[in-house]
Image (spheres, helix red, strand yellow):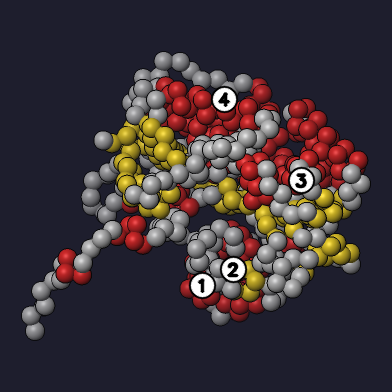
Amino acid sequence: MIFDVAVLGGGPAGMAAATEAAHGGARVVLLEESPAPGGQVYRAPPAGFEMKPDRDRQEGDALRAALAASGADIRTGCRVWGLGGGPLMPEGEAAAPFSLSALGADGVPFTIEARALILCCGTHERIIPFPGWTLPGVIGLAAATILLKAQGILPGQRVVVAGAGPLLYAVAAKILAGGGSVVAVIDAATPAEWLRALPALSARPDLLAQGAVWRAGLLAARVPVLAGAQVTAAEGDKVLSAVRVGERVFQADALCIGHGLVPATEASRTYRAQHAHRPEDGGWVPVLDAAQRTSVAFLYAAGDGAGVRGAAAAPAAGRLAARTALHDLGFRLHHASKEDAALARARRTGAAMARMMALRPAMVAAIPAETIICRCEGVPRSEIEKAAAAGANTINQLKHFTRCGMGPCQGRMCGEAAGALLATARGVDVAEVGFATGRIPLRPVPMASILGDFDYADIPVPAPAPI
């Protein structure tokens, strides 16, 4: 069976898109890597875990319930590794449905085909490298939220929380609520930056009030908050024991750090959709029209993977993408969708937070020469600059020169910093060095799971060419 619409990613945008498309009469499949839909903000706890309900859980449960009742085919716990069809057909061949190859939760490979594909791939977090950032005990803010929200596990007992954006204070508050100690909060944003964001934040008084509660909790716990500061080194013998911030040193067994969110564009890049570099949206994002269409026919994108705007704004984009896909496929739409004022305000607030979490060039410039940038391949800053001097002009060329971005994460952790360093070394804007070409596999998968059982005698060997 060929589906009408496939949705890749089960966060708030993906859940809303699949629900809307199914309600419109389409045959819909949603593919999600986690055990349950929800994404990062609305992440559901594992089976058997009892977590205290909160607003995020309630909103996520409402989206999950609507999705479950929609009739969409929901496939969770599956890892999509291969993309085909659509614009990837060989030249001269007729257009074909999009195809997505995945490993199911049971480890069995499968492939689905769909006439239209909506990408709701979310983000991955940005961590600007610094000395010691690869030490055990240093984890991302987003990773910390998974531990805290989904499983109620503290990242450590004495924790430094550092980075930029509201997630900084959310993680600190949850550590305190869980019984841990927050040694310090290191906020890269200055008070002036927060003041500039207030008009947009005031459009969401609920979030403003939540932020005030978080800050009050830190004040009550006498947690020092250093504004306009950054971690300069993580220190320790094999594991983290201290965090250095300029001349100050904080003893800690965990450092939760994150410098914003980066849209996950692996799939849209693999399908060769047009992209633009927009720091205020998180970096490289697919170019969309007003109805969420990419430059590739029947390929759409929604949610933070198409530009960071936050979980509150994502469902509206997902529903719009679904309705556009239905229209393009020839489905009859029986009612017009309206975006209410609350969602418009959510978009403005999300944009303000995204600007605060944008890549900070000064932070990249401060990376010492021997600091590891690509942790998968062990490539330091000095090697990137040597490659630039030797003629590497683009990210793809940098990969050839240094293997930077060729490890299991495929540049998700190092790509932005490497691109900024390469651009600086060349004296050009970061947009000029481009981004890595999308390749499969999108995610690491066991070779045995893809190949299955075979004998070498089964491999067809062509006859020798005549001499």
The answer to whether mark 4 and mark 1 are in CB contact below 8 A is no
Amino acid type, residue under disc 3 in the picture: Ile
- At mark 1, the secondary structure is loop
Amino acid type, residue under disc 4 in the picture: Ala
The answer to whether mark 2 and mark 3 are in CB contact below 8 A is no
- Distance from label 1 to label 2 (Cα)? 9 Å
Residue situated furthest left in the rendering:
466
Residue situated furthest top in the rendering:
334
User: Residue 403 got which mark?
Assistant: 1
Location of mark 2 (residue): 374
- Distance from label 4 to label 1 (Cα)? 44 Å
Q: Quadrant of residue 152?
A: top right
The answer to whether mark 1 and mark 2 are in CB contact below 8 A is yes
* Depth order, front residue of 233/347: 233
Where is residue 351 drawn, in percent x and y?
68, 39
Where is residue 245 drawn, in percent x and y?
84, 63
Residue located at (28% from left, 36% from top): 2
* Quarter containing the N terminus: top left
Amino acid type, residue under disc 2 in the picture: Cys
* 4 vs 3, front mark: 3
Mark 3 nearby-residue class (10 Å; few <14, some 14–19, many ≥20): many
Location of mark 4 (residue): 62
Residue 405 visible in the shown view = yes
Q: Quadrant of residue 135?
A: bottom right
- At mark 3, the secondary structure is helix
Location of mark 3 (residue): 175
Residue situated furthest front in the rendering:
48
